[in-house]
Amino acid sequence: MNRGVAITGIGPVTALGLGIEPLWAAMEAGETGIRPLEAFDGAAWECPFAGELPADAFSIRKLVPKHYRKATKVMCRDIELAMGAALMAVQDAGLTTAGAGEGEPTIAPDRVGCHIGAGLICADVNELGAALITSKTDDGDFSLGHWGEAGMENLTPLWLLKYLPNMLACHVTIVHDCQGPSNTITCWESSAPLSMAESVRVIQRGAADACLTGGVESRLNVLATWRQQCAGRLTTASASDDPATIVRPYADDADGTVLGEGGGILVVEEVEHAKARGATIKAVIAGLGCTQSIEGNTITSASAESIGDAIAQAMQQASYGPDDIDAIVPMGLGIPGIDQAERDALRSALGERADTLPMVLLTPTTGNCCAGHGAVQLAVATRCLETQQLPSGAASLRSVLVLTASQGGQNTATILSRGTDV
């Protein structure tokens, strides 16, 4: 269990595009990927904006091997984005796999695991509606009895395979031939850090030398967005507003967040294994903390105590004190109750230093990528450490603290340290 684990590849996919470069460039320039909704007509919604990847910036058929293109017919948006993120991560790590590069795999397939955080089953209105309408009675009402007996048979035959949460990891493992331990975690914004935690444990106990890990989700469909609006998590905005200013983390007038789509896959690898193959160690996973809030409202608020406990766990595991943390990548969703809990937890764990450390805020740039959000945070934190840069400029960074406090109450704290220290 003493095997060190490093990050050797990052593959975020956000509204800015595939890979870290377009996202980092936007953050440096103070630009945003939030724009008017295109996935459906957002004119009548309280928030007509989203962090949406433009259709012309992403083609799944160009990102999978030719022999696998037929399978793209049963990929929902989440799976497509996960496939793109996995390819970016594998290439960034300098790996050859069955789905990337030419020649023998860099790592034996049975020594590569895969853990990807995901959302729950996507309820696509067009496909569901086409089946539901067949169960209308003569007077136009919906018949649940008919739906149970015959109506649901009108769903497309492979409907479930298209939307099951574990299908992200399923397709990634097939294409890249990951034969090691695999799992899917569905814990909202904490899905990716929890998946990383599982990957770390798998590597530490010797069951794999490397894992593809992270999380991806797109909730840019009518029903999923409607649920978030009903839950009171989305900001109120009009079409004439500047999308760069509508998400205001920690601001006194903040009133909610904006949904984004995307996430990221990272390659995590045993340190000595990475060194042996000449990989660039971008960051080291120094400490992980995971807690569960037990308070009633985990939708628009969070438990500062529980988040603080996660930070304390991560710092204890890393043998760090407050002075060892040099930057923070928090959730910063712009949801007042969650923002305040994060702020209180940081002050409790880090004392006065919490108010002086630089924060790297992602949500105003990408929107809340839900199950993928923590993966984007981890990818950006890794970039900061590897380049010794914050989006605002050069910085001396020994470690970065990444926080998530998810809808549902799962909290994580991840401490990444610079790769040059191992």
Image (cartoon, helix red, strand yellow):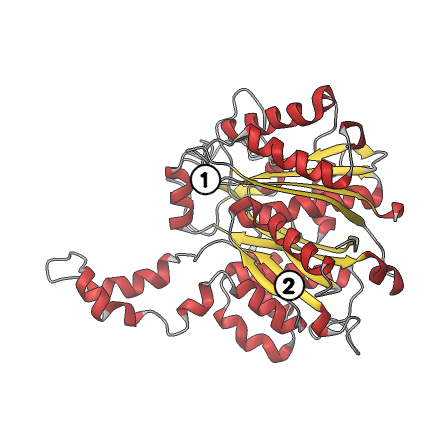
332 or 191, which is in the foreground? 191
Contact (Cβ within 8 Å) of mark 1 with mark 2: no
Is residue 130 at least partly visible in the picture? yes
Q: Where is residue 305 in the image (x, y as percent from the top left)?
A: 56, 29
- The residue shown at (70%, 31%) is 359
- The residue type indicated by label 1 comes to Pro
The answer to which image quadrant residue 317 occupies is: top right
Residue carrying label 2:
114
**Where does the image place residue 411, in percent across and percent down from the top left?**
57, 40
Q: Which residue is most to the front? A: 1
Residue 48, disc: 1
Does residue 256 appear to the left or right of 33 in the view shown?
left
Q: Is residue 413 above or below residue 22?
A: above
Where is residue 184? Give x, y as percent. 55, 59
Q: Position of residue 320 (x, y in %)?
A: 78, 34
**How many residues crowd around disc 1 within 10 Å: few (fewer than 14), some, or many (20 or more)?**
many
Q: Is mark 2 on a helix, strand or loop?
A: strand
Q: How crowded is mark 2: few (under 14 residues within 10 Å), some or many (20 or more)?
A: many
